[in-house]
Image (spheres, helix red, strand yellow):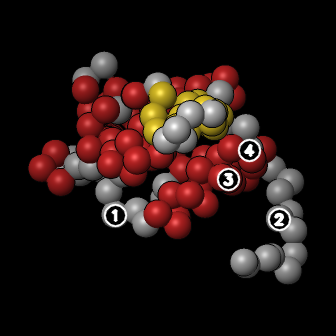
Amino acid sequence: MYKKKLEDDIRCPLEYGLEIFGGKWKSRIICVLAARQVLRYSEIRHEMINITDAVLASTLKQLIQNGIVDRKSYDEIPPRVEYRLTEKGRSVVPILQEICHWSGAFYKEDTEHTMTQCQKCDYLSGT
């Protein structure tokens, strides 16, 4: 397993925020969970496009460690695990929606090739 040689040197609140919900997959997972509330791993995987199982598992683990996503395991056969946003995770959704609104002003909209999870964004739904 990869281990960083140096710890992150985050001194700015913006850097902290981008570390928590930035990157290619974190914001997408947050948006999917915001739209669907509670999902099992396979359901999240189905909602995401072009993500490998290793990357999804790793990203979910990071979101859980940062208090954005809650993982609840049920003692059943077969085992059932559900993921949902925490209060901290839900609090970031309006920020991501605002980024989407801002981006819409400068990004050429291509609804034919828009990702499924982005179609759930308030910007694209017109609200």
Q: Amino acid at mark 3?
A: Gln
Question: Hey, which residue is sitting farthest left in the picture?
Answer: 112
Of 104 and 121, the residue lying toward us: 121
Q: Is residue 73 left or right of residue 65?
A: left
Measured in 3D between alpha carbons, the distance from the residue under mark 3 to the one under mark 4, in whole angstroms, is: 6 Å
Of 107 and 67, the residue lying toward us: 67
Secondary structure at badge 1 equals loop
* Residue, disc 2: 8
Rendering quarter of residue 100: top left
Question: Within 10 angstroms of label 2, few (less than 14), some, or many (20 or more) residues?
Answer: few
From the image, state whether disc 2 or disc 4 is nearer to you. 4
Q: Residue 62 shows which numbered tag?
A: 3
Pointer 2 or 3: first along the chain? 2
Q: Residue 66 shows which numbered tag?
A: 4
Using the image, determine if residue 4 lies above or below residue 69: below
Marks 3 & 1, CB-CB < 8 Å contact = no
Using the image, determine if residue 53 lies above or below residue 115: below
* Residue, disc 1: 50
Pointer 3 or 1: first along the chain? 1
- Residue drawn at x 86%, y 63% is 9
Give the position of the N terminus as an image quadrant.
Answer: bottom right
Q: Position of residue 35 (x, y in %)?
A: 40, 28
Question: Within 10 angstroms of label 3, few (less than 14), some, or many (20 or more) residues?
Answer: some
Question: Within 10 angstroms of label 1, few (less than 14), some, or many (20 or more) residues?
Answer: few
Marks 3 & 4, CB-CB < 8 Å contact = yes
Question: Hey, which residue is sitting farthest top in the picture?
Answer: 127
